[in-house]
Image: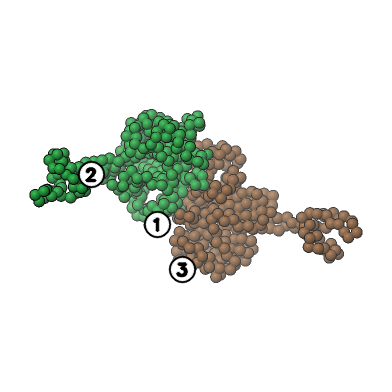
Chain colours: A green, B brown
Amino acid sequence: MKFHLTILGSSSATPTSDRYPSSQILNISDKLYLVDCGEATQIQLRRYKFKIQKINHIFISHLHGDHYLGITGLLSTMSILGRTTTLHIYSSHLLKDIIDLQIKISDIHLGYALEYHFLKYDASELLLTDKNTSIYSFPLTHRIPTCGFLFINSVKEKNIIREFLQKEQLTFDEIKKIKVGEDYITGDGRIIKNQDITMAKSKPVSYAYCADTMYDESVVPYITGVDLLYHEATFMHNMSDAAREKQHSTTIDAANIALKANVKQLIIGHYSARYTELEPILKEAQSVFANTILAIEGKTYYLSD
Amino acid sequence: MKFHLTILGSSSATPTSDRYPSSQILNISDKLYLVDCGEATQIQLRRYKFKIQKINHIFISHLHGDHYLGITGLLSTMSILGRTTTLHIYSSHLLKDIIDLQIKISDIHLGYALEYHFLKYDASELLLTDKNTSIYSFPLTHRIPTCGFLFINSVKEKNIIREFLQKEQLTFDEIKKIKVGEDYITGDGRIIKNQDITMAKSKPVSYAYCADTMYDESVVPYITGVDLLYHEATFMHNMSDAAREKQHSTTIDAANIALKANVKQLIIGHYSARYTELEPILKEAQSVFANTILAIEGKTYYLSD
Protein backbone atom coordinates (compact mmCIF):
# COMPACT_ATOMS: atom_id res chain seq x y z
CA MET A 1 0.00 0.00 0.00
CA LYS A 2 1.11 3.48 -0.92
CA PHE A 3 3.26 5.40 1.59
CA HIS A 4 4.87 8.41 -0.09
CA LEU A 5 6.52 11.44 1.44
CA THR A 6 6.92 14.66 -0.59
CA ILE A 7 8.95 17.60 0.68
CA LEU A 8 7.26 20.98 0.11
CA GLY A 9 9.62 23.11 2.17
CA SER A 10 13.10 22.38 3.50
CA SER A 11 14.25 25.73 4.85
CA SER A 12 14.62 26.86 8.44
CA ALA A 13 13.20 30.16 9.71
CA THR A 14 14.58 32.31 6.88
CA PRO A 15 13.52 31.01 3.48
CA THR A 16 15.73 31.48 0.41
CA SER A 17 14.68 32.14 -3.15
CA ASP A 18 14.48 28.39 -3.78
CA ARG A 19 13.94 26.83 -0.35
CA TYR A 20 10.55 27.31 1.28
CA PRO A 21 9.65 27.07 4.98
CA SER A 22 8.75 23.69 6.49
CA SER A 23 6.00 21.60 5.00
CA GLN A 24 5.65 18.01 3.90
CA ILE A 25 2.85 15.89 2.56
CA LEU A 26 2.29 12.19 3.09
CA ASN A 27 0.21 10.09 0.76
CA ILE A 28 -0.70 6.98 2.73
CA SER A 29 -3.07 4.66 0.89
CA ASP A 30 -4.28 7.62 -1.18
CA LYS A 31 -5.06 9.78 1.82
CA LEU A 32 -3.13 13.03 2.10
CA TYR A 33 -1.70 14.22 5.43
CA LEU A 34 -0.08 17.66 5.59
CA VAL A 35 2.73 18.03 8.13
CA ASP A 36 3.50 21.66 8.99
CA CYS A 37 2.38 24.48 6.78
CA GLY A 38 4.97 27.23 6.36
CA GLU A 39 4.35 30.30 4.28
CA ALA A 40 3.47 29.51 0.64
CA THR A 41 2.65 25.85 1.29
CA GLN A 42 -0.46 26.30 -0.86
CA ILE A 43 1.74 27.47 -3.74
CA GLN A 44 4.05 24.47 -3.32
CA LEU A 45 1.05 22.11 -3.24
CA ARG A 46 -0.09 23.53 -6.58
CA ARG A 47 3.42 23.45 -8.01
CA TYR A 48 3.77 19.74 -7.24
CA LYS A 49 0.22 18.92 -8.39
CA PHE A 50 -1.42 17.90 -5.13
CA LYS A 51 -5.18 18.19 -4.90
CA ILE A 52 -5.60 20.41 -1.88
CA GLN A 53 -9.19 19.39 -1.27
CA LYS A 54 -7.98 15.83 -0.68
CA ILE A 55 -6.16 17.01 2.45
CA ASN A 56 -8.36 16.31 5.45
CA HIS A 57 -5.75 16.33 8.22
CA ILE A 58 -3.13 18.97 8.98
CA PHE A 59 -0.50 18.49 11.69
CA ILE A 60 1.30 21.57 13.04
CA SER A 61 4.35 20.73 15.12
CA HIS A 62 4.70 24.11 16.83
CA LEU A 63 3.92 27.79 16.43
CA HIS A 64 7.09 29.28 15.04
CA GLY A 65 6.05 31.13 11.89
CA ASP A 66 8.05 29.01 9.47
CA HIS A 67 5.90 26.02 10.46
CA TYR A 68 2.38 27.50 10.36
CA LEU A 69 2.16 30.89 8.60
CA GLY A 70 0.76 29.28 5.44
CA ILE A 71 -2.29 27.78 7.07
CA THR A 72 -4.73 30.70 6.97
CA GLY A 73 -4.14 31.22 3.26
CA LEU A 74 -4.61 27.51 2.61
CA LEU A 75 -7.86 27.39 4.62
CA SER A 76 -9.17 30.40 2.70
CA THR A 77 -8.27 28.90 -0.68
CA MET A 78 -9.96 25.61 0.24
CA SER A 79 -13.13 27.57 0.94
CA ILE A 80 -12.95 29.69 -2.22
CA LEU A 81 -12.58 26.49 -4.25
CA GLY A 82 -15.80 25.12 -2.77
CA ARG A 83 -14.76 22.81 0.04
CA THR A 84 -17.53 21.46 2.26
CA THR A 85 -15.67 18.56 3.96
CA THR A 86 -14.55 18.99 7.57
CA LEU A 87 -10.85 19.68 7.97
CA HIS A 88 -8.99 18.34 11.02
CA ILE A 89 -6.19 20.40 12.50
CA TYR A 90 -3.81 18.90 15.07
CA SER A 91 -2.03 21.76 16.82
CA SER A 92 -1.67 23.94 19.86
CA HIS A 93 -4.92 25.57 20.99
CA LEU A 94 -3.17 28.89 20.32
CA LEU A 95 -3.30 28.28 16.58
CA LYS A 96 -7.08 28.40 16.83
CA ASP A 97 -6.79 31.84 18.45
CA ILE A 98 -4.68 33.09 15.54
CA ILE A 99 -6.91 31.59 12.84
CA ASP A 100 -10.10 32.80 14.54
CA LEU A 101 -8.74 36.35 14.76
CA GLN A 102 -7.62 36.37 11.12
CA ILE A 103 -10.92 34.98 9.87
CA LYS A 104 -12.88 37.51 11.93
CA ILE A 105 -10.81 40.48 10.75
CA SER A 106 -10.94 39.43 7.09
CA ASP A 107 -14.68 38.87 7.49
CA ILE A 108 -14.46 35.61 5.58
CA HIS A 109 -16.74 32.64 6.11
CA LEU A 110 -15.32 29.18 5.54
CA GLY A 111 -17.74 26.92 3.73
CA TYR A 112 -16.66 23.92 5.80
CA ALA A 113 -16.03 23.02 9.44
CA LEU A 114 -12.66 23.08 11.18
CA GLU A 115 -12.20 20.42 13.83
CA TYR A 116 -9.29 21.10 16.13
CA HIS A 117 -7.42 18.42 18.06
CA PHE A 118 -5.19 20.13 20.56
CA LEU A 119 -1.81 18.51 21.09
CA LYS A 120 -0.35 17.43 24.37
CA TYR A 121 3.28 18.41 24.63
CA ASP A 122 4.37 16.30 27.56
CA ALA A 123 3.68 12.74 26.40
CA SER A 124 3.01 10.61 23.36
CA GLU A 125 -0.57 10.43 22.19
CA LEU A 126 -2.55 8.55 19.55
CA LEU A 127 -4.04 11.29 17.37
CA LEU A 128 -5.79 9.28 14.72
CA THR A 129 -6.45 5.76 13.53
CA ASP A 130 -7.84 5.24 10.09
CA LYS A 131 -8.10 1.69 8.71
CA ASN A 132 -4.46 0.63 8.62
CA THR A 133 -2.99 4.01 9.53
CA SER A 134 -2.14 5.20 13.04
CA ILE A 135 -0.73 8.62 13.77
CA TYR A 136 0.91 9.60 17.06
CA SER A 137 2.42 12.74 18.50
CA PHE A 138 5.39 12.77 20.86
CA PRO A 139 7.26 15.57 22.66
CA LEU A 140 10.33 17.31 21.27
CA THR A 141 12.67 19.77 22.96
CA HIS A 142 12.54 23.26 21.48
CA ARG A 143 12.11 26.86 22.63
CA ILE A 144 8.31 26.62 22.64
CA PRO A 145 6.04 23.56 22.99
CA THR A 146 6.75 21.28 20.02
CA CYS A 147 5.61 17.84 18.90
CA GLY A 148 7.00 15.24 16.59
CA PHE A 149 4.67 12.96 14.64
CA LEU A 150 4.82 9.24 13.96
CA PHE A 151 2.93 7.69 11.05
CA ILE A 152 2.51 3.93 10.95
CA ASN A 153 0.76 2.11 8.16
CA SER A 154 0.15 -1.60 8.58
CA VAL A 155 0.14 -3.21 5.18
CA LYS A 156 -1.52 -6.58 5.09
CA GLU A 157 0.21 -9.16 2.90
CA LYS A 158 -0.52 -12.84 2.33
CA ASN A 159 1.95 -15.37 3.68
CA ILE A 160 1.76 -19.04 2.70
CA ILE A 161 1.27 -21.21 5.76
CA ARG A 162 4.37 -23.13 6.75
CA GLU A 163 2.86 -26.66 6.70
CA PHE A 164 1.70 -26.25 3.11
CA LEU A 165 5.06 -24.84 2.04
CA GLN A 166 6.82 -27.83 3.60
CA LYS A 167 4.45 -30.37 2.01
CA GLU A 168 4.36 -29.03 -1.54
CA GLN A 169 7.36 -28.36 -3.79
CA LEU A 170 6.23 -24.91 -4.99
CA THR A 171 7.98 -23.09 -7.82
CA PHE A 172 8.86 -19.42 -7.43
CA ASP A 173 6.04 -18.52 -9.83
CA GLU A 174 3.49 -20.54 -7.87
CA ILE A 175 4.52 -18.85 -4.62
CA LYS A 176 4.12 -15.44 -6.27
CA LYS A 177 0.64 -16.28 -7.55
CA ILE A 178 -0.57 -17.57 -4.19
CA LYS A 179 0.78 -14.43 -2.46
CA VAL A 180 -1.34 -12.21 -4.69
CA GLY A 181 -4.47 -14.28 -3.93
CA GLU A 182 -4.72 -17.01 -6.54
CA ASP A 183 -5.93 -20.51 -5.72
CA TYR A 184 -3.46 -23.41 -6.11
CA ILE A 185 -3.97 -26.33 -8.48
CA THR A 186 -2.23 -29.52 -7.43
CA GLY A 187 -0.42 -31.91 -9.76
CA ASP A 188 -3.53 -34.12 -9.93
CA GLY A 189 -5.84 -31.18 -10.74
CA ARG A 190 -7.42 -30.48 -7.34
CA ILE A 191 -8.13 -26.80 -6.58
CA ILE A 192 -7.02 -25.63 -3.15
CA LYS A 193 -8.64 -22.35 -2.10
CA ASN A 194 -6.23 -19.48 -1.45
CA GLN A 195 -7.67 -18.76 2.02
CA ASP A 196 -6.93 -22.34 3.12
CA ILE A 197 -3.19 -22.03 2.47
CA THR A 198 -2.42 -18.40 3.35
CA MET A 199 -2.62 -16.12 6.34
CA ALA A 200 -2.62 -12.34 6.32
CA LYS A 201 0.45 -10.81 7.84
CA SER A 202 0.79 -7.24 8.89
CA LYS A 203 3.93 -5.45 7.77
CA PRO A 204 4.12 -1.98 9.26
CA VAL A 205 5.75 0.92 7.43
CA SER A 206 6.65 3.85 9.62
CA TYR A 207 7.77 7.45 9.30
CA ALA A 208 8.72 9.86 12.08
CA TYR A 209 8.93 13.65 11.80
CA CYS A 210 11.20 15.53 14.22
CA ALA A 211 11.29 19.30 13.63
CA ASP A 212 12.19 21.49 15.37
CA THR A 213 14.26 20.01 18.16
CA MET A 214 17.59 20.20 19.87
CA TYR A 215 19.60 17.02 20.42
CA ASP A 216 17.69 15.07 23.05
CA GLU A 217 17.97 11.29 23.42
CA SER A 218 14.65 11.12 25.22
CA VAL A 219 13.05 11.06 21.77
CA VAL A 220 14.63 7.69 20.94
CA PRO A 221 11.91 5.43 22.41
CA TYR A 222 9.24 7.06 20.24
CA ILE A 223 11.06 6.57 16.96
CA THR A 224 13.05 3.38 17.43
CA GLY A 225 13.27 1.24 14.30
CA VAL A 226 11.20 3.45 12.00
CA ASP A 227 11.71 2.97 8.29
CA LEU A 228 12.39 6.66 7.70
CA LEU A 229 13.23 9.34 10.23
CA TYR A 230 13.04 13.02 9.28
CA HIS A 231 15.22 14.89 11.74
CA GLU A 232 16.03 18.56 11.45
CA ALA A 233 19.67 19.48 10.81
CA THR A 234 19.60 23.26 10.81
CA PHE A 235 23.36 23.63 11.24
CA MET A 236 26.59 21.86 10.44
CA HIS A 237 28.74 20.57 13.26
CA ASN A 238 30.99 23.64 13.50
CA MET A 239 27.92 25.61 14.56
CA SER A 240 26.90 23.32 17.41
CA ASP A 241 27.02 26.19 19.89
CA ALA A 242 24.47 28.12 17.83
CA ALA A 243 22.40 24.94 17.59
CA ARG A 244 22.36 24.51 21.38
CA GLU A 245 21.54 28.16 21.95
CA LYS A 246 18.61 28.14 19.52
CA GLN A 247 17.56 24.63 20.53
CA HIS A 248 18.13 23.27 17.05
CA SER A 249 20.19 20.28 15.85
CA THR A 250 23.30 19.81 13.77
CA THR A 251 23.92 17.18 11.10
CA ILE A 252 25.84 15.13 13.66
CA ASP A 253 23.04 15.44 16.22
CA ALA A 254 20.49 14.16 13.72
CA ALA A 255 22.76 11.29 12.68
CA ASN A 256 23.43 10.30 16.29
CA ILE A 257 19.71 10.17 17.04
CA ALA A 258 19.20 8.00 13.94
CA LEU A 259 21.97 5.71 15.14
CA LYS A 260 20.67 5.39 18.68
CA ALA A 261 17.10 4.85 17.46
CA ASN A 262 18.30 2.22 15.00
CA VAL A 263 16.19 3.65 12.19
CA LYS A 264 16.49 2.25 8.67
CA GLN A 265 17.04 5.57 6.95
CA LEU A 266 17.51 9.20 7.96
CA ILE A 267 16.32 12.20 5.95
CA ILE A 268 17.61 15.59 7.06
CA GLY A 269 16.22 19.07 6.35
CA HIS A 270 15.31 22.46 7.87
CA TYR A 271 18.56 23.83 6.46
CA SER A 272 19.82 27.23 7.52
CA ALA A 273 19.71 29.79 4.70
CA ARG A 274 23.51 30.18 5.04
CA TYR A 275 24.05 26.84 3.25
CA THR A 276 23.78 27.19 -0.50
CA GLU A 277 25.35 23.77 -1.14
CA LEU A 278 23.75 20.77 0.56
CA GLU A 279 26.34 18.08 -0.29
CA PRO A 280 28.68 18.98 2.60
CA ILE A 281 25.72 18.75 4.98
CA LEU A 282 24.86 15.32 3.65
CA LYS A 283 28.44 14.06 3.84
CA GLU A 284 28.80 15.23 7.44
CA ALA A 285 25.64 13.39 8.52
CA GLN A 286 26.70 10.28 6.59
CA SER A 287 30.00 10.22 8.46
CA VAL A 288 27.97 9.13 11.50
CA PHE A 289 24.93 7.49 9.92
CA ALA A 290 25.64 6.20 6.42
CA ASN A 291 22.07 5.75 5.25
CA THR A 292 21.24 9.44 5.31
CA ILE A 293 19.55 11.35 2.50
CA LEU A 294 18.67 15.00 1.89
CA ALA A 295 15.18 16.49 1.96
CA ILE A 296 14.83 18.08 -1.49
CA GLU A 297 11.80 20.18 -2.34
CA GLY A 298 9.43 18.61 -4.82
CA LYS A 299 11.04 15.19 -4.42
CA THR A 300 8.94 12.21 -3.41
CA TYR A 301 10.34 9.43 -1.22
CA TYR A 302 8.67 6.04 -1.57
CA LEU A 303 8.45 4.16 1.74
CA SER A 304 6.08 1.73 0.08
CA ASP A 305 4.65 1.67 -3.45
CA MET B 1 15.42 60.54 -10.18
CA LYS B 2 14.68 56.85 -9.89
CA PHE B 3 11.05 55.78 -9.71
CA HIS B 4 10.76 52.04 -10.37
CA LEU B 5 7.86 49.67 -9.72
CA THR B 6 8.48 45.91 -9.46
CA ILE B 7 5.61 43.43 -9.26
CA LEU B 8 6.15 40.69 -6.65
CA GLY B 9 2.67 39.17 -6.75
CA SER B 10 -0.11 39.52 -9.32
CA SER B 11 -2.66 36.94 -8.21
CA SER B 12 -6.00 37.44 -6.54
CA ALA B 13 -7.07 35.51 -3.43
CA THR B 14 -6.09 32.07 -4.74
CA PRO B 15 -2.46 31.94 -5.88
CA THR B 16 -1.36 29.65 -8.68
CA SER B 17 1.91 27.76 -9.03
CA ASP B 18 3.45 30.78 -10.76
CA ARG B 19 1.41 33.75 -9.62
CA TYR B 20 1.83 34.93 -6.03
CA PRO B 21 -0.57 36.98 -3.89
CA SER B 22 -0.44 40.80 -4.03
CA SER B 23 2.79 42.61 -3.37
CA GLN B 24 4.75 45.34 -5.12
CA ILE B 25 7.88 47.26 -4.37
CA LEU B 26 8.68 50.82 -5.33
CA ASN B 27 12.20 52.13 -5.57
CA ILE B 28 11.91 55.91 -5.40
CA SER B 29 15.26 57.70 -5.28
CA ASP B 30 16.83 54.53 -3.86
CA LYS B 31 14.30 54.17 -1.05
CA LEU B 32 12.22 51.02 -1.06
CA TYR B 33 8.49 51.11 -0.31
CA LEU B 34 6.62 47.80 -0.03
CA VAL B 35 2.96 47.89 -1.05
CA ASP B 36 0.94 44.96 0.29
CA CYS B 37 2.63 41.82 1.51
CA GLY B 38 0.84 38.64 0.48
CA GLU B 39 2.08 35.19 1.48
CA ALA B 40 5.68 34.52 0.33
CA THR B 41 6.52 38.17 -0.34
CA GLN B 42 9.83 37.61 1.44
CA ILE B 43 10.63 34.78 -0.97
CA GLN B 44 9.79 36.97 -3.96
CA LEU B 45 11.96 39.79 -2.57
CA ARG B 46 14.88 37.36 -2.43
CA ARG B 47 14.12 35.94 -5.82
CA TYR B 48 14.25 39.38 -7.42
CA LYS B 49 17.31 40.47 -5.42
CA PHE B 50 15.87 43.21 -3.24
CA LYS B 51 17.66 43.99 0.00
CA ILE B 52 14.92 43.51 2.53
CA GLN B 53 16.65 45.57 5.20
CA LYS B 54 16.41 48.59 2.92
CA ILE B 55 12.63 48.49 3.26
CA ASN B 56 11.59 50.98 5.95
CA HIS B 57 7.95 51.53 4.99
CA ILE B 58 5.26 48.92 4.38
CA PHE B 59 1.78 49.88 3.19
CA ILE B 60 -1.05 47.37 3.67
CA SER B 61 -4.19 48.24 1.70
CA HIS B 62 -6.59 45.99 3.61
CA LEU B 63 -6.76 42.84 5.69
CA HIS B 64 -7.75 40.15 3.25
CA GLY B 65 -5.13 37.44 3.61
CA ASP B 66 -3.77 37.70 0.08
CA HIS B 67 -2.62 41.25 0.89
CA TYR B 68 -1.00 40.79 4.30
CA LEU B 69 -0.30 37.15 5.25
CA GLY B 70 3.39 37.49 4.37
CA ILE B 71 4.12 40.28 6.80
CA THR B 72 4.81 38.32 9.99
CA GLY B 73 7.33 36.08 8.24
CA LEU B 74 9.03 39.12 6.72
CA LEU B 75 9.22 40.91 10.08
CA SER B 76 10.71 37.80 11.66
CA THR B 77 13.31 37.38 8.90
CA MET B 78 14.33 41.04 9.18
CA SER B 79 15.01 40.45 12.86
CA ILE B 80 16.90 37.19 12.34
CA LEU B 81 19.12 38.96 9.82
CA GLY B 82 20.04 41.59 12.40
CA ARG B 83 17.82 44.57 11.69
CA THR B 84 17.89 47.41 14.22
CA THR B 85 16.24 50.20 12.16
CA THR B 86 12.64 51.15 12.95
CA LEU B 87 10.11 49.78 10.46
CA HIS B 88 6.99 51.82 9.63
CA ILE B 89 3.76 50.02 8.90
CA TYR B 90 0.77 51.84 7.40
CA SER B 91 -2.30 49.69 7.95
CA SER B 92 -5.48 49.05 9.87
CA HIS B 93 -5.01 48.95 13.64
CA LEU B 94 -6.26 45.36 13.44
CA LEU B 95 -3.03 44.27 11.74
CA LYS B 96 -1.21 45.23 14.91
CA ASP B 97 -3.52 42.90 16.86
CA ILE B 98 -2.65 40.01 14.52
CA ILE B 99 1.10 40.67 14.54
CA ASP B 100 1.18 41.18 18.32
CA LEU B 101 -0.62 37.87 18.88
CA GLN B 102 1.67 35.97 16.51
CA ILE B 103 4.83 37.44 18.01
CA LYS B 104 3.62 36.67 21.53
CA ILE B 105 2.69 33.07 20.71
CA SER B 106 5.94 32.39 18.85
CA ASP B 107 7.82 33.97 21.75
CA ILE B 108 10.04 35.89 19.37
CA HIS B 109 11.58 39.25 20.09
CA LEU B 110 12.12 41.63 17.21
CA GLY B 111 15.46 43.39 17.41
CA TYR B 112 13.97 46.64 16.06
CA ALA B 113 10.95 48.84 16.66
CA LEU B 114 7.69 48.72 14.71
CA GLU B 115 5.98 52.05 14.27
CA TYR B 116 2.38 51.78 13.17
CA HIS B 117 0.49 54.48 11.29
CA PHE B 118 -3.17 53.54 11.28
CA LEU B 119 -5.03 54.33 8.09
CA LYS B 120 -8.20 56.34 7.77
CA TYR B 121 -10.61 54.70 5.41
CA ASP B 122 -13.04 57.55 4.81
CA ALA B 123 -10.85 60.28 3.33
CA SER B 124 -7.51 60.93 1.69
CA GLU B 125 -4.58 61.47 3.99
CA LEU B 126 -0.92 62.43 3.64
CA LEU B 127 0.96 59.47 5.15
CA LEU B 128 4.55 60.47 4.60
CA THR B 129 6.72 63.17 3.08
CA ASP B 130 10.36 62.43 2.55
CA LYS B 131 12.49 64.95 0.63
CA ASN B 132 10.85 64.90 -2.80
CA THR B 133 8.46 62.04 -2.12
CA SER B 134 4.90 62.34 -0.83
CA ILE B 135 2.68 59.36 -0.15
CA TYR B 136 -1.08 59.57 0.33
CA SER B 137 -3.84 57.09 1.10
CA PHE B 138 -7.36 57.37 -0.28
CA PRO B 139 -10.51 55.30 0.19
CA LEU B 140 -11.52 52.41 -2.07
CA THR B 141 -14.77 50.45 -2.15
CA HIS B 142 -14.38 46.82 -1.12
CA ARG B 143 -15.97 44.34 1.29
CA ILE B 144 -13.83 45.49 4.22
CA PRO B 145 -12.11 48.86 4.84
CA THR B 146 -9.56 49.33 2.04
CA CYS B 147 -7.17 52.08 0.98
CA GLY B 148 -5.43 52.95 -2.23
CA PHE B 149 -2.03 54.65 -2.16
CA LEU B 150 -0.66 57.52 -4.23
CA PHE B 151 3.09 58.05 -4.59
CA ILE B 152 4.36 61.36 -5.94
CA ASN B 153 8.00 62.13 -6.51
CA SER B 154 8.94 65.64 -7.50
CA VAL B 155 12.08 65.49 -9.58
CA LYS B 156 13.95 68.77 -9.83
CA GLU B 157 15.47 69.45 -13.23
CA LYS B 158 17.30 72.49 -14.58
CA ASN B 159 15.54 74.51 -17.27
CA ILE B 160 17.39 77.17 -19.26
CA ILE B 161 15.77 80.57 -18.79
CA ARG B 162 13.79 81.72 -21.80
CA GLU B 163 15.55 85.07 -22.33
CA PHE B 164 18.96 83.40 -22.56
CA LEU B 165 17.65 80.77 -24.96
CA GLN B 166 16.19 83.44 -27.21
CA LYS B 167 19.38 85.55 -27.15
CA GLU B 168 21.98 82.80 -27.79
CA GLN B 169 21.99 80.30 -30.64
CA LEU B 170 22.69 77.21 -28.54
CA THR B 171 23.57 73.85 -30.10
CA PHE B 172 21.84 70.72 -28.84
CA ASP B 173 25.05 69.69 -27.09
CA GLU B 174 25.36 73.02 -25.33
CA ILE B 175 21.75 72.81 -24.09
CA LYS B 176 22.42 69.31 -22.74
CA LYS B 177 25.55 70.47 -20.88
CA ILE B 178 23.81 73.46 -19.27
CA LYS B 179 20.91 71.24 -18.17
CA VAL B 180 23.29 68.96 -16.26
CA GLY B 181 24.85 71.97 -14.51
CA GLU B 182 27.81 73.15 -16.61
CA ASP B 183 28.68 76.79 -17.05
CA TYR B 184 28.39 78.33 -20.56
CA ILE B 185 31.31 79.80 -22.46
CA THR B 186 30.33 82.46 -24.99
CA GLY B 187 31.86 82.84 -28.46
CA ASP B 188 34.22 85.52 -27.13
CA GLY B 189 35.34 83.39 -24.20
CA ARG B 190 33.31 84.82 -21.31
CA ILE B 191 32.15 82.32 -18.70
CA ILE B 192 28.50 82.60 -17.71
CA LYS B 193 27.69 80.80 -14.44
CA ASN B 194 25.14 78.00 -14.70
CA GLN B 195 22.95 79.42 -11.92
CA ASP B 196 22.58 82.69 -13.85
CA ILE B 197 21.00 81.04 -16.88
CA THR B 198 18.94 78.18 -15.40
CA MET B 199 16.06 77.69 -13.00
CA ALA B 200 15.10 74.50 -11.21
CA LYS B 201 11.79 73.09 -12.31
CA SER B 202 9.85 70.45 -10.48
CA LYS B 203 8.52 67.62 -12.59
CA PRO B 204 6.34 65.28 -10.55
CA VAL B 205 6.15 61.57 -11.31
CA SER B 206 3.15 59.80 -9.84
CA TYR B 207 1.90 56.26 -9.27
CA ALA B 208 -1.45 55.19 -7.83
CA TYR B 209 -2.28 51.73 -6.44
CA CYS B 210 -5.92 50.62 -6.42
CA ALA B 211 -6.45 47.08 -5.09
CA ASP B 212 -8.88 45.73 -4.12
CA THR B 213 -11.86 47.71 -5.28
CA MET B 214 -15.10 47.48 -7.15
CA TYR B 215 -15.86 49.96 -9.93
CA ASP B 216 -16.42 53.27 -8.20
CA GLU B 217 -15.92 56.61 -9.93
CA SER B 218 -15.51 58.39 -6.61
CA VAL B 219 -11.84 57.31 -6.77
CA VAL B 220 -11.21 59.46 -9.87
CA PRO B 221 -10.32 62.75 -8.10
CA TYR B 222 -7.54 61.04 -6.12
CA ILE B 223 -5.80 59.57 -9.14
CA THR B 224 -6.47 62.04 -11.95
CA GLY B 225 -3.55 62.45 -14.33
CA VAL B 226 -1.13 60.03 -12.67
CA ASP B 227 1.69 58.69 -14.80
CA LEU B 228 0.85 55.10 -13.96
CA LEU B 229 -2.30 53.67 -12.39
CA TYR B 230 -2.36 50.13 -11.02
CA HIS B 231 -5.98 49.07 -10.93
CA GLU B 232 -7.10 45.56 -10.07
CA ALA B 233 -8.81 43.58 -12.83
CA THR B 234 -9.71 40.34 -11.11
CA PHE B 235 -12.21 39.26 -13.77
CA MET B 236 -12.92 39.62 -17.48
CA HIS B 237 -16.03 41.45 -18.59
CA ASN B 238 -18.21 38.35 -18.94
CA MET B 239 -17.88 37.88 -15.17
CA SER B 240 -19.02 41.37 -14.21
CA ASP B 241 -21.79 39.95 -12.04
CA ALA B 242 -19.22 38.03 -9.98
CA ALA B 243 -17.10 41.18 -9.82
CA ARG B 244 -20.00 43.23 -8.43
CA GLU B 245 -20.92 40.54 -5.94
CA LYS B 246 -17.36 40.23 -4.61
CA GLN B 247 -16.71 43.97 -4.90
CA HIS B 248 -13.90 43.47 -7.38
CA SER B 249 -13.35 44.98 -10.84
CA THR B 250 -13.27 43.69 -14.38
CA THR B 251 -10.80 44.64 -17.13
CA ILE B 252 -13.40 47.05 -18.53
CA ASP B 253 -13.98 48.60 -15.10
CA ALA B 254 -10.25 49.24 -14.65
CA ALA B 255 -9.95 50.69 -18.15
CA ASN B 256 -12.96 52.97 -17.64
CA ILE B 257 -11.48 54.35 -14.42
CA ALA B 258 -8.18 54.98 -16.24
CA LEU B 259 -10.09 56.79 -19.00
CA LYS B 260 -12.13 58.96 -16.64
CA ALA B 261 -9.05 59.77 -14.52
CA ASN B 262 -7.10 60.66 -17.66
CA VAL B 263 -4.05 58.72 -16.48
CA LYS B 264 -1.07 58.31 -18.78
CA GLN B 265 -0.82 54.51 -18.46
CA LEU B 266 -2.80 51.73 -16.81
CA ILE B 267 -1.29 48.56 -15.35
CA ILE B 268 -3.73 45.79 -14.45
CA GLY B 269 -3.26 42.84 -12.09
CA HIS B 270 -4.83 40.79 -9.26
CA TYR B 271 -5.83 38.20 -11.81
CA SER B 272 -8.22 35.42 -10.89
CA ALA B 273 -6.54 31.99 -10.85
CA ARG B 274 -8.99 30.85 -13.55
CA TYR B 275 -7.02 32.79 -16.19
CA THR B 276 -3.97 30.90 -17.36
CA GLU B 277 -3.47 33.19 -20.39
CA LEU B 278 -3.21 36.92 -19.74
CA GLU B 279 -3.25 38.21 -23.33
CA PRO B 280 -7.08 38.13 -23.63
CA ILE B 281 -7.30 40.12 -20.38
CA LEU B 282 -4.91 42.72 -21.76
CA LYS B 283 -6.71 42.99 -25.09
CA GLU B 284 -10.07 43.46 -23.37
CA ALA B 285 -8.75 46.33 -21.23
CA GLN B 286 -7.00 47.89 -24.25
CA SER B 287 -10.30 47.93 -26.13
CA VAL B 288 -11.35 50.71 -23.74
CA PHE B 289 -7.99 52.21 -22.70
CA ALA B 290 -5.28 51.61 -25.27
CA ASN B 291 -2.27 52.37 -23.10
CA THR B 292 -2.79 49.41 -20.78
CA ILE B 293 -0.08 46.95 -19.74
CA LEU B 294 -0.04 43.76 -17.67
CA ALA B 295 1.46 43.39 -14.19
CA ILE B 296 4.02 40.59 -14.64
CA GLU B 297 5.84 39.17 -11.64
CA GLY B 298 9.50 40.01 -11.45
CA LYS B 299 9.14 42.73 -14.08
CA THR B 300 10.22 46.29 -13.30
CA TYR B 301 8.41 49.29 -14.76
CA TYR B 302 10.45 52.48 -15.05
CA LEU B 303 8.39 55.60 -14.36
CA SER B 304 11.63 57.57 -14.22
CA ASP B 305 15.22 56.42 -14.56
* Residue wearing tag 1: A81
Q: In which chain is the residue bearing label 1?
A: A
Tell me which residue sits at (61%, 49%) in the image.
B32
* Residue wearing tag 3: B238
Residue placed most toward the observer, A202 or B21:
A202
Q: Nearer the viewer, mark 2 or mark 3?
A: 2
Callout 3 amino acid: Asn
Callout 1 amino acid: Leu
Residue placed most toward the observer, A292 or A105:
A292
Q: From the top left corner, tell me how far across and down residue B175 is, in percent.
A: 79, 60
Q: Relative to B234, is A1 above or below?
A: above
Q: From the top left corner, tell me how far across and down residue B135 is, in percent.
A: 63, 53
Contact between marks 3 and 1 (CB within 8 A): the answer is: no
As measured in the structure, the alpha-carbon distance from the residue carrying label 3 to the one carrying label 1 is 20 Å
As measured in the structure, the alpha-carbon distance from the residue carrying label 2 to the one carrying label 1 is 39 Å
Q: Is residue A248 visible?
A: no
How many neighbours does mark 3 have within 10 angstroms: few (below 14), some (14-19), or many (20 or more)?
few
Q: In which chain is the residue bearing label 2?
A: A
Please check whether the numbered discs 2 and 3 fall on a single chain: no
Left/right of residue A127 with respect to residue A194 in the rendered view: right
Please check whether the numbered discs 3 and 1 fall on a single chain: no
Callout 2 amino acid: Glu
In the rendered picture of this protein, how many numbered marks are placed on residues? 3
Contact between marks 2 and 1 (CB within 8 A): the answer is: no
- The disc at residue A157 is 2
As measured in the structure, the alpha-carbon distance from the residue carrying label 2 to the one carrying label 3 is 55 Å
Left/right of residue A114 with respect to residue B261 in the rendered view: left
Residue at the far bottom in the pictured view: B287
